[in-house]
Image: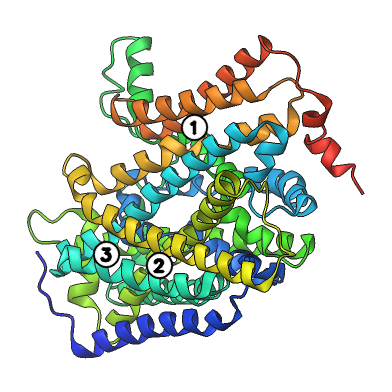
Amino acid sequence: MGTGTTQWADLCVIVTYMVSMVALGAYFTRRQKSASEYLLASRNVGWFAIGLSLLSTLNSAIDYVIGPAQILEYGFMNLVMILPVFISFPIIFRYFLPFYQRLRFFNCYEYLEHRFNVRVRIIVTLIFILWRISWMGTTLYLPAYVLHVAMGWDLLWTIAVLGAITTVYTTLGGVRAAIWTDVTQAFIMFAGLILAIILVTAQVPGGMGHVWTVSREAGFMYFTARIPGMAEAPGVFEKIGLYFHANLTFWSILIMGTLSKLTSYGADQVMVQRYLTAKSIDDSRRGFLLNSIAYVIYSLLFILLGMGLFTYFKLYPLPEGTRYEYMFPYFIDRHVPVIVKGLIIAAIYAAAQSSVSSGITATAAAIFSDLYLRLFKNQVSVDEHVSEAVQREQVRISRICALCLGLGVTLFACLIRHLHANDGLFSLFNKMVASFAGLIIPIFLLGMFSRRVGSAGVGLGALLGLAAGYYWAFHTRLGYGWTACVAFVVTVLVAYGVSLLQPVPGRDKLAWCWKDIMARP
C-alpha cells in the first residue's frame, strides 16, 4: 500500500527534530553528577514541565495513528474515555500527591517494603518492569508498523531508528532530559494534531459543518455499545455473555478507564517519578491539573480528527482493501503538502518517543533502587549524602540500566510482529494495557487504607492477579475492557482472604498507612 513518497524536505524536518532531541539530551549530560539528579532531577522541576511531561508520557503514538479510526467503531463512546479523568482526579489530588510528597522516597515501590516487606516490593517492581517493557515495546512497534503499511517504510529500520535515538538522549540526559524533551514533544504533538484537523476539514466541502452532518448521519452520536447479535439473543444469559464479550461498552470503559488512570497516576513509577521531581506539593498539584485539562483537550481533538477523516474518505474513498485504522497515515502520505507532512510525522515520532523515554527513566530508577541497591548493596533507599566517587558510580550504573532497557525495548518491539500476526493493532495494545491496568493499584490502596491486610496476602494476590489478567486477556473471549476488573478483583480477594488467616500486621507496619503518614510532622 505504501508509496514511499516522502520527500527530502520532509526528511529534513524529521531529521532536524531527531537531532534536536539528541542535542537536548546531550545538553543535560553535564548536570548528571548523582543518582538523585539523573533519576529525580534533584527534585526541583516546576509545575508546567511536570504537567506537559505527564501528558506526553501517557499519550503515545498509538493514539496518534489509531485514535482517529476509533470514532468509526465506537462513535461518541470515545467521550466516555474522558470521564475517568474526572473520577480519578480528586482521589489522586487528595490522597496520592500529598502522600508521595510527604514520604519523599526515591521511587514509589520503596513504600511497599515499609508497609509490607521486601518480597512484596520486589514482586511489584518485577511486575512493573514487565508491564513497562511490554508497553514501551508496543508503543514503538505500532506506529512503526502503521507507517510501514501506509507509507512503505521498512518496519525494522523504523523501529530501530525510533528506539536508538530515544535510548541515546534518555541515557545521556536522564529524567531531566526526558521531562524537557516531553515538553517539546507535547507542543509538537498538539501542533501536528491541529495542523491535521485544519488540513482535513479544508479539503471537505462545507468544512466542519459538513463533517458534523456526515458524522451524525453515520450514527456516531451514540454513547452505548453496538453489540452484534444482542437483539437476536434468545435469553438473558446469552445477552449477558455477549455484553461481556464486547471489547468496549459504556461501563467497561468507565471501570477500566478509572482503574487505568488510578494505576497510572497513583501506582506507576513512570508517573510518580514526575511527582517526585517536583519542587513542592503545590507544583505536583498544578502539574497534575494542567495534565488533566490538556488531556481532555487532546482527546476532543482526536475525536474531531476522526470525524473529519471519515467524512473526507466518504467523499474520496480509500482504495479497495485499505483498513480504516490506516486512514490517518494514508491521508498523510497522499494528501498532506511537503514539509507539513514532515511536521506531522515528527509529531507521531514525538508521541512514541515521549512515552518510551519516560518509561526508560522510570524503569531504570526501579531497577537501580529496588533491585541493584536493595539486593546487591542491601540499601533500602538511595543515600543522597555519599562521596562524589560513589555518586559518579551510581550515575554510571543508572546509565547502564537505561541503555540496556532502551536496547531491550527496541529488540522486543522488533519481535512483537509475531504477536501482531494473531491480533489487530488496537486489540493487541489494549490487551497489553488491560492485563496490567488493575493489578498494582489495589496493592497500594490496601497498603494505604487497610489495617488488616498483610504481606503474605498482597504478595500472593499480586502473583495470582498477574496470572488472571494475562489469562483472561489472551486466552478467553472476555472483552479487553473487563480484563483490568478481573486483575483488580482477584488481587483484592486473594490479598484480603489470605490476610484473614494471618495475624494482624504489627504496629511498625501499620504506621505506614495513609492516615498515620499524613499525621506526621
Report the mark closest to the observer, 3 or 2: 2
Indicate the quadrant where residue 306 lies. Answer: bottom left
Q: Secondary structure at mark 3?
A: helix
Vertical arrangement, residue 265 with respect to residue 504, above or below: below
Quadrant (top left/top right/bottom left/bottom right) for the N terminus: bottom left
Q: Secondary structure at mark 2?
A: helix
Give amino acid for label 1.
Trp
Q: Residue at x 18, y 81 (%)?
A: 6
Indicate the quadrant where residue 501 lies. Answer: top right
From the top left corner, tell me how far across and down residue 87 is, in percent.
64, 43
From the top left corner, tell me how far across and down residue 232 is, in percent.
26, 18
Q: Residue at x 9, y 61 (%)?
A: 319
Give amino acid for label 2.
Gln
User: Which residue carries the number 2 mark?
Assistant: 353
User: Which residue carries the number 1 mark?
Assistant: 251
User: Of label 3 and label 2, which has the lower sequence position?
Assistant: 3
Q: Residue at x 35, y 73 (%)?
A: 165
Residue 516 lies left or right of residue 484; in this view the side is: right
Whether the residues at callouts 2 and 1 have beta carbons within 8 Å, the answer is no
- Which is more toward the observer, 202 or 427? 427
**Mark 3 Cα within 10 Å, few/some/many (few <14, many 20+)?**
many
Q: Secondary structure at mark 1?
A: helix
User: Which residue carries the number 3 mark?
Assistant: 328
